[in-house]
Amino acid sequence: MESLTEERIEIRDDHKQPLLIRSRINNSSQLAIVGANICPIQSLDYELIENDLLKQDWRSRTKVEIYQYVVLKWTLALLIGLITGLVGFFNNLGVENIAGFKLLLTNNLMLKQKYHEAFAVYVGCNMILGVGAAALCAYIAPAAAGSGIPEVKAYLNGIDAHSILAPSTLFVKIFGSILGVAAGFIVGKEGPMVHTGACIANLLGQGGSRKYRLTWKWLRYFKNDRDRRDLITCGAAAGVAAAFRAPVGGVLFALEEAASWWRSALLWRTFFTTAVVAVVLRSLMQFCHQGGGRCGLFGEGGLIMFDVNSAKPAYTTPDLLAVIFLGVIGGLMGSFYNYLVDKVLRTYGAINERGPIFKILLVMIISFVTSCIRFGLPLLSKCVPCPGECPSSPTGGFSIHYDNFQCPPNHYNDLSSLFFTTNDDAIRSLFNDGSASANTGFQLSSLIIFFVAIYLLGIVTYGVAIPSGLFIPVILAGASYGRLIGTVMAPFTALDTGLFALLGAASFLGGTMRMTVSLCVILLELTNNLLMLPLVMLVLLISKTVADCFNKGVYDQIVALKGLPYMEAHAEPYMRNLVAGDVVSGPLFSFCGIEKVGNILHALKVTEHHGFPVVDEPPLTDAPELCGLVLRSHLLVLLKHKTLFTRERVMTGSTIVNKVKARDFAKPGLGRGIRVEDLDISQEEMEMYVDLHPITNTSPYTVVETMSLAKAALLFRELGLRHLLVVPKKPGRPPIVGILTRHDFMHDYILGLFPNLNPHK
């Protein structure tokens, strides 16, 4: 994970007793797992940089340009909502039609008593779809594997990785999710939609592209991490809104789970974006409803709304005890689910590291097992008489095609209505109150079999190299045991079994994901049942409280497992025993205000640091003093402009401001920007000087070396910093002690320096 070198140091008190045993570790690099790919990661620059060039740029902006910037932000929010809504609609349309034709083909063979051929076709179709999704992830965009929510959450926390939001990742996320869900895997397309929305926002917020000559002047304002962060927050919220048709839930999801920084202006834009998504989805659904066959035989798009229960919630005090019991069960089952997911992901990580072929083989194995369970387990279920005439049209559910498989006329197979259909339709069946259609009653044995199968399949499927979400598997498992408990307690409660299924889904979601407000609103928007608000709130609070006693939420666990250096909202208790000066690592590379070109080039070649202190020394000042911080990317741009070099050590700030513009130092889009290898500097130029003052951030955030590490960590996270300068407490010392970066606050790094502070020892 890190490039480490050790040196043991003892810190003693006045009585010469060792207080802390420190192993000096240089954490110069960091690797993490993004999707199914191991790659180096960097921090994002959310800090507002103040140097002479940017100040000149701000002063030169006219009112028209400021107005254009504001209008463009809202225009991009509108485009994010439009495109994400369209993608969500066609995503669902593709899944409904591909899965529908696959199941129809299989059922036609079964109606002809060709059961072996039906099984072969079913397994073969699932295998082809699964391999297609795996091949896209393995060969085109490994970062697209998995849910994508941990990666988006990490990005909004200030962590950047190669191709995490690239166009190739967006392409694979969309089509890989369609193929994976249509292949019958116990996965959802809701998690990938969050990643998809973030990718769309990132693509729109690139600020133009020199490669494709899209470099209009007004696009340059978005060539910074701060504006991109806000757009990606809107994209993540739009993804949830498109997946669940829950615009308010999308905003709350971004606020509660995804974003690490929030403000009222961002709330308005995010809400506007999700409202656009809701309007787009509603319009497209109307388009499908008005014209028969416009959207295919099965798909109508946006069919993720589970408004299928007409029962009115009526509950008494004994019913509340049952709800509390559901919350406790959800917390216990959810924490155990997270524990097993963590173990499976570690195992799959070792397999996926072997190469693309092993990723595809693992997907093929899981696909075959899933297909066998979906096709074979309905054989264990008894036939149940229909409470009327069994439906005979394709819209009645694919389970009706099992009538001639093992059931006499006017009988149906309840387990097949859960397994032999799409995941969304299975959830609708579980949420149904039993009055909407004939095939909605479930035997206890069928619910037990379905719960165990979905619980285990959801665990072993997550982590394979396909885009896969956790929402749908968790809702399926929770709804199944919720309906099971509702069926058992039917004689003693006034609540409908379908409402118990909803509460079971809420309890399991709370136990695995540990969200409360956003999940509550998403579920209410999903089911269009506001009367269930008090019970859903109660069950979510209980399940989260119980699960928190055992482990972290599933996304927090995955972030840690992937090695992403996520900054938590709170500091660890042992950080109060340390100060900022204890963890800064060396050696420290700093530059003079007017530095020799050769020295700058040498520092850029021998280090991977992205920030360097600039110290003014005599004769520029009476004594050495800290001028500020200069970024690596800015130094590379400066060294590209050789006309700025001088043979004498003189200040040329005004010349530099006139010759180069702030937009030359803007962060590049999807390209890699300038590298050290791109510089062509002669030996003569190496002996020349360049003035760093115009590109130096003269107001970097600094802390005194005696500040507690816990306080410094909170400051670092709340301000969204990449570098935090540590200055000495007493005069007479060098003006800079060191620089704190994200990795200096990581749990493993600190306990590597001070093993005796480990709370688990």
Image: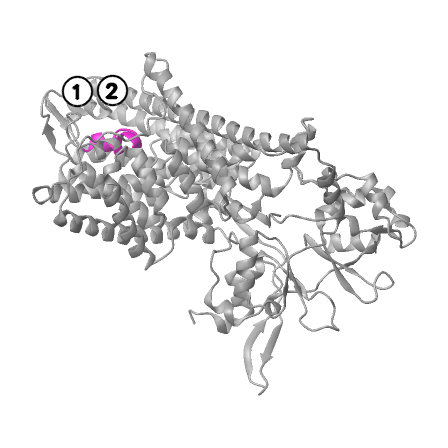
Q: Residue at x 16, y 51 (%)?
A: 321
Q: Is residue 193 visible?
A: no
Three-letter code for the amino acid on which mark 2 is drawn: Thr
Q: Is residue 60 above or below residue 345?
A: above
Point out residue 741 in the picture as x, y percentages from the top left corner: 61, 57
Instruction: Give the quarter of the image for residue 655.
Output: top right
Pointers 2 and 1 in contact (CB under 8 A)? yes
Secondary structure state at the residue bearing disc 2: helix
Based on the picture, tell me whether residue 426 belongs to the magenta stretch. Answer: yes
Secondary structure state at the residue bearing disc 1: loop
Residue wearing tag 1: 391
The crowd level at tag 2 (other Cα within 10 Å; few <14, some 14-19, many 20+) is: few
Magenta span: predominant SS is helix
Instruction: Give the quarter of the image for residue 117.
Output: top left
Position of residue 182 in the picture relative to residue 76 (left or right)? left
Position of residue 675 in the picture relative to residue 38 (left or right)? right
Point out residue 621 in the picture as x, y percentages from the top left corner: 83, 63
Position of residue 741 in the picture relative to residue 461 (left or right)? right
Q: Is residue 694 above or below residue 573?
A: above
User: Which region of the structure is painted magenta?
Assistant: 415-427
Looking at the figure, which quarter contains the C terminus? bottom left
Q: Residue at x 68, y 66 (%)?
A: 737
Point out residue 588 in the picture as x, y percentages from the top left corner: 71, 63
Three-letter code for the amino acid on which mark 1 is drawn: Pro
Looking at the figure, which quarter contains the N terminus? bottom right
Residue wearing tag 2: 395
The crowd level at tag 1 (other Cα within 10 Å; few <14, some 14-19, many 20+) is: some
Position of residue 124 in the picture relative to residue 681 (left or right)? left
Q: Is residue 449 above or below residue 399?
A: below
